[in-house]
């Protein structure tokens, strides 16, 4: 944010410098054109965002108005009697994304650290390329892989999960269910695999730009690789790392096809992660084509609006988190 | 600058109108994914014979109904018929196209295709979550010769809105008062239990992978994927296997010719050979569309009724009885003057 302010301050100076240097008029007008063009493109993003928000609001209004705040807390989703509530899907979206983050963040950190700090030079590029290729795989492929390969394989472990984790007092409830291989936990794991490349790629890039003198000083003082990662690299790249994690989270929240394939698509709440559930994006994908009545369609679009708001809240939380980290840093110094 | 842009747009618009005019040999339709294989197959041969292209987009019945109401397509296809009141209100007409059916498939070790026998009330109780085990006395009673495992039943249903679900739920509503009161019938419903797979292939792959599961899929899909299907007791109390003949028997017993706007649903019909979970797809047209457009559509389906039946059979769609086809032609004459 500070950098952009500085850039804005610098603009008039650059402009005067341009005029003073008595360059050809064409250059100035080209510059003028370029600046306005970039501004227009930037505005386009803001306008489309606003447009989407308005459209979702307008279309979802009927359902929101009809059900009021109960839309947010009701667990019933009945297209026949037209009683719609979003809670099942909100919970499903948050839980599957949370599982994804729990898996993706440590793994991505390990991958990025390996590439930037430990991998021999010849291995660095192939591993990096593999990550970028993973990011390019369409989500429906992940969905099919999840359904046809991962779920049957994972179902072999579910009896074990039932017997061991399911037997624990308290959290055992989370791990009891039929060994189907599909459900909230599977969806979260596949989502985690899907967002690893995004988080890992950003972490790798910023780890690589951590100034060598910083790291070398730490090593010189006898720090281990872990200590350097934990106390030098991570604090230095904190902002970008958080940004990367939230980018991954944003993708997980809105992921549709892969989740639809393996979350199990049951429109009811269950305590266990092994049971099928539903997310906002998956229920919209499932039911939009056959939503014949106004209220039904409106309820689905209202779900879209809720997803929008959830994503927005997540971004705000990320910003606040960074601000707090900055302030703590300031206090320490 | 704006003026020139406007005039250029106008030229473009005029040009596109002309190109539409020149390309009148095209019919657009949208809707049901169930009927898509049939319309697609018919349209290829129809284009070869007549040079007329039929552009059909399988966007789902709900989408098809919305598009025909908005007037953006020449015909919409739906697996769930509209009521005569709704048709009148929107200036629409509808007629059936072809007959199909669906059946329950299962994954039980040691029990092969066609060996398991089910009845409507038992299926309803399984899908209501009241029958939870395969060795439940209600299932055992229907299958005295089978050794049913002591295994939990995993119910599988469609997660996407679908005419297959509508037909299935409509059947259960007719069979079970409890189902009718608690769940009802629609293209998407509030399932009391189970997991949802996307599309026929989603349900089929769940069933193939989860031991002790049961699901419902279209008959064409059972044939194609060689799934273990159940036999059912029909309304007459006869034990039947799913077959085209069984679907056609269902159609023969509903009198399409007597129902206003062909508003009849083929599930749970009488007749010794009738397959209980039979269904149908309707085409919906606008009364106020240009006569040439409606004529192009009716000619296509007329051709399909006459020449497309063996093609339909090859992909597990049953032809309509001749009396129904005659009734449809009379209906066209009466409502569209064609």
Image (cartoon, coloured by chain):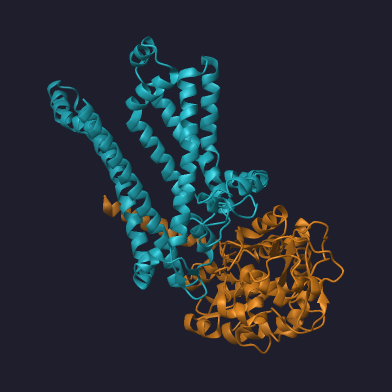
Chain colours: A cyan, B orange
The reply, left or right, for residue B93 in relation to residue A254 is right
List x then y, in percent, for residue B23.
Answer: 56, 61
Q: Quadrant of the N terminus of chain A?
A: top left
Point out residue B273 in the picture as x, y percentages from the top left corner: 82, 79
Provide residue B109's location: percent of width, then percent of height.
80, 56
Camera-side residue: A167 or B217?
A: A167
Residue at 57 percent across and 80 percent down: it is B181
Instruction: Identify whether A37 is placed above or below A175.
Output: above
Q: Is residue B25 above or below residue A307?
A: below
Relative to B164, say whether A126 is above or below: above
**Residue in the image at 39% along x and 62% along y:** A302
Q: How many marks?
A: 0
Residue A316 at x, y = what percent?
30, 45
Is the C terminus of chain A in the top left, top right, bottom left or bottom right quadrant?
A: top left
Relative side of A121 to B252, left or right? left
Whether residue B263 appears in this view of the structure is yes
* Residue sitting nearer the eye, B221 or B286: B221
* Closer-to-camera residue (A96/A129): A96
Q: Seen from this angle, which residue lies furthest front? A: A169
In which quadrant of the rendered view does residue B236 lie?
bottom right
Residue B318 seen in render? no
Residue drawn at x 45%, y 49% as measured from the top left: A254
* Quarter-of-image position of residue A173: bottom right
Which residue is outermost to the top? A220
Residue farthest bottom in this picture:
B258
Which quarter of the picture shows residue B108?
bottom right
Determine whether A211 is above or below A281 in the image. above
């Amino acid at each position: 944010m500070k950098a952009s302010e500085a850039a804005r301050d610098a603009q008039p100076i650059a402009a005067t410098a341009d005029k003073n240097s008595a360059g050809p008029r064409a250059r100035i007008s080209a510059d003028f054109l370029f600046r306005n063009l970039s501004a227009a493109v930037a505005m386009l993003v803001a306008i489309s965002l606003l447009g989407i928000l308005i459209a979702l609001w307008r279309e979802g209004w009927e359902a929101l108005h009809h059900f009021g705040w109960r839309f947010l807390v009701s667990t019933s989703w009945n297209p026949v009697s037209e009683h719609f509530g979003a809670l099942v899907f909100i919970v499903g979206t948050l839980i599957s994304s949370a599982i994804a983050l729990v898996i993706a963040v440590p793994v991505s950190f390990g991958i990025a650290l390996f590439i930037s700090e430990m991998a021999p030079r010849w291995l660095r590029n192939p591993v990096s390329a593999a990550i970028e290729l993973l990011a390019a795989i369409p989500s429906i492929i992940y969905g099919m892989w999840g359904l046809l390969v991962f779920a049957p394989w994972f179902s072999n472990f579910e009896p074990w999960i039932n017997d061991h984790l399911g037997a624990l007092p308290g959290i055992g409830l989370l791990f009891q269910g039929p060994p189907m291989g599909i459900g909230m936990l599977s969806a979260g794991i596949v989502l985690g695999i899907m967002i690893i490349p995004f988080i890992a790629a950003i972490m790798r890039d910023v780890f690589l730009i951590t100034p060598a003198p910083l790291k070398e000083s730490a090593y010189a003082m006898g720090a281990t690789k872990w200590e350097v990662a934990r106390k030098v690299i991570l604090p230095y790249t904190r902002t970008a790392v958080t940004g990367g994690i939230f980018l991954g989270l944003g993708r997980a929240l809105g992921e549709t096809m892969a989740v639809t394939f393996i979350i199990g698509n049951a429109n009811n709440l269950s305590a266990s992660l092994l049971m099928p559930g539903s997310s906002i994006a998956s229920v919209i994908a499932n039911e939009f084509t056959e939503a014949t009545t106004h209220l039904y369609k409106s309820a689905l679009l209202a779900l879209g609006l809720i997803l929008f708001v959830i994503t927005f809240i997540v971004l705000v939380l990320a910003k606040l988190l960074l601000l707090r980290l900055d302030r703590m840093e300031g206090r320490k110094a | 600058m704006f003026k020139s842009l406007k005039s250029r747009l106008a030229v473009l618009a005029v040009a596109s109108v002309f190109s539409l005019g020149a390309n009148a040999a095209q019919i657009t339709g949208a809707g049901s994914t169930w009927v898509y294989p049939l319309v697609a197959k018919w349209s290829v041969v129809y284009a070869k014979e007549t040079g007329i292209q039929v552009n059909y987009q399988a966007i789902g019945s709900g989408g098809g109904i919305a598009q025909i109401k908005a007037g953006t397509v020449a015909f919409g296809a739906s697996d769930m018929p509209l009521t005569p009141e709704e048709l009148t209100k929107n200036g629409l007409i509808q007629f059936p196209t072809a007959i199909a059916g669906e059946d329950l498939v299962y994954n039980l070790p040691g029990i092969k295709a066609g060996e398991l026998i089910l009845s409507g009330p038992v299926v309803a109780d399984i899908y209501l979550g009241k029958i939870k085990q395969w060795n439940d006395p209600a299932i055992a009673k229907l299958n005295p010769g089978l050794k049913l495992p002591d295994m939990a039943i995993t119910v599988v249903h469609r997660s996407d809105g679908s005419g297959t679900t509508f037909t299935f739920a409509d059947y259960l509503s007719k069979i079970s008062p409890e189902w009718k009161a608690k769940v009802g019938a629609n293209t998407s419903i509030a399932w009391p239990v189970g997991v949802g797979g996307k599309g026929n292939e989603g349900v089929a792959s769940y069933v193939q992978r989860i031991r002790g599961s049961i699901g419902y899929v279209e008959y064409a899909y059972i044939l194609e994927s060689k799934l273990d299907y159940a036999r059912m007791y029909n309304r007459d109390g006869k034990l039947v296997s799913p077959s085209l003949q069984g679907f056609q028997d269902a159609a023969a017993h509903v009198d399409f010719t007597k129902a206003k706007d062909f508003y009849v649903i083929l599930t749970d019909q009488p007749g010794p050979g009738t397959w209980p979970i039979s269904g149908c797809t309707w085409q919906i047209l606008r009364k106020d569309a240009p006569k040439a457009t409606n004529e192009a559509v009716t000619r296509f389906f007329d051709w399909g009724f006459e020449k497309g039946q063996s093609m339909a059979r090859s992909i597990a769609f049953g032809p309509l009885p001749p009396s129904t086809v005659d009734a449809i032609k009379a209906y066209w004459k009466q409502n569209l003057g064609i």
